[in-house]
Amino acid sequence: MARAAEEEYYRILEVDKGVSQEEIKKAYRKMALKYHPDRNPGDKSAEQQFKKAAEAYEILGDAEKRKRYDTYGREGVRGSEAHFTSFEDIFEHFSDVFGGGTIFEEFFGAQARGHTARRRGASLRVDIEVDLREVVTGVEKTIGLNRREPCGTCSGTGVRPGTSPKKCSACDGRGEVQQSQGFFVLRTTCVKCGGRGSIIEHPCQVCHGNGHVTKRHHIKVRIPPGVEDGVRLRVGGQGEPGENGAPSGDLYCDIHVKPHTIFKRRGKDIVCEVPVGFAQAALGCDLDVPTLKGTAIKVKIPRSTQYGDIITVKGEGLPSIHGWGKGSLLVQIVVETPSGLTEKQEELLREFASTENKNLNPKQKSFLRKVKEHFR
């Protein structure tokens, strides 16, 4: 499907940026009904607007994604967008907005119900954890999930082999009953057959008439380099199978990057707090600093380094998920105050302290000047 690449999501849904989440939802319902393909048969422009509205709501309808979009624009939600492959995909993905599909039945009647005759398979969702080192190179994960499959004994029909379903007498096989109320015709799902149009008198002994059995599957999912915490990856066609030959649903993988014991992530950059002694910070030194590759690099700490100073090592951060270069390793200096001093060390520090009053540091001079001005 074509993406709404150059259009602003709020403009697509025709709402102001500050509206509530409920208003976003109402706006999307309005747009979906206006441009629904059954209401605009053959209108390619309406189909395009219907798809764009779904793509906009995928971001704005989620409070966290909307916050990232408001702050960073489209770059903030790269990798979080759903990729819709059909109209049924949109109906399934936003079933909470469409009321499980009934909203379109209400407006479009039997024509809309034609969509459910070959209903696309349900989409599934899993959580996948990765560690920060795996983010550097990307990783392939094998996940296990239970998925409904057509019963092999009855081929998904739900009936015992050698028998056939019986046409429902209540709806005459239509799957729905209708009642006339003045000028209006009210159609409702047949209670007796549940909308199937037939009754299974001799259910399959394996699936007990459901037509499906649950099986364990193991699926390989490729996690790209630079993936961020909270990104949702879509694996097309790995959801549950559709009905009557309809396409299978998709598998959505929510990625969770585990916290690291040494490094903290800041976008593409990696922050590493490195403790140094008072003398090392004052005189300068060379330090071995760990990297995400599992090796250490030499980093020069300049003279007179202060607590919190950051030394940038380019190219030692994380790759961009979009392939636009790598971030940096930010070495943040933490100057430690010495403790457990020996008598000799304490004597030397006292001697040094006596000279500090004569040669104040720049920050001390600035602070004392401000204090004097404050008490004038």
Image (cartoon, rainbow, N blue to C red):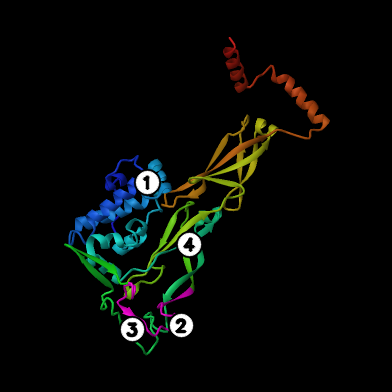
54 lies left or right of 335: left
Residue that badge 3 annotates: 165
Label 1 or label 2, whichever comes before in sequence order = 1
User: Magenta-highlighted stretch: main secondary structure?
Assistant: loop
Mark 1–mark 3 distance (CA, rounded to whole Å): 46 Å
Label 4 or label 3, whichever comes before in sequence order = 4
Residue that badge 1 annotates: 21
Residue that badge 2 annotates: 206
Label 3 or label 2, whichever comes before in sequence order = 3
For residue 210, which quarter of the picture? bottom left
Q: Which contiguous range is marked in magenta?
A: 191-215
The front one of 132 and 129 is 129
Q: Which amino acid does label 2 sit on?
A: Val
Furthest residue in direction bottom, as rendered: 162
Q: Quadrant of the C terminus?
A: top right
Label 1 or label 3, whichever comes before in sequence order = 1
Secondary structure at badge 2 equals loop
Query: Do callouts 4 and 3 mark residues in contact (Cβ within 8 Å)?
Result: no
Up-down: is 274 above or below 253? above
Q: What residue type is labelled 4?
A: Val
Discs 4/3, front: 3
180 lies left or right of 80: left
Q: What's the mark number on residue 126?
A: 4
Mark 4–mark 2 distance (CA, rounded to whole Å): 28 Å
206 lies left or right of 24: right
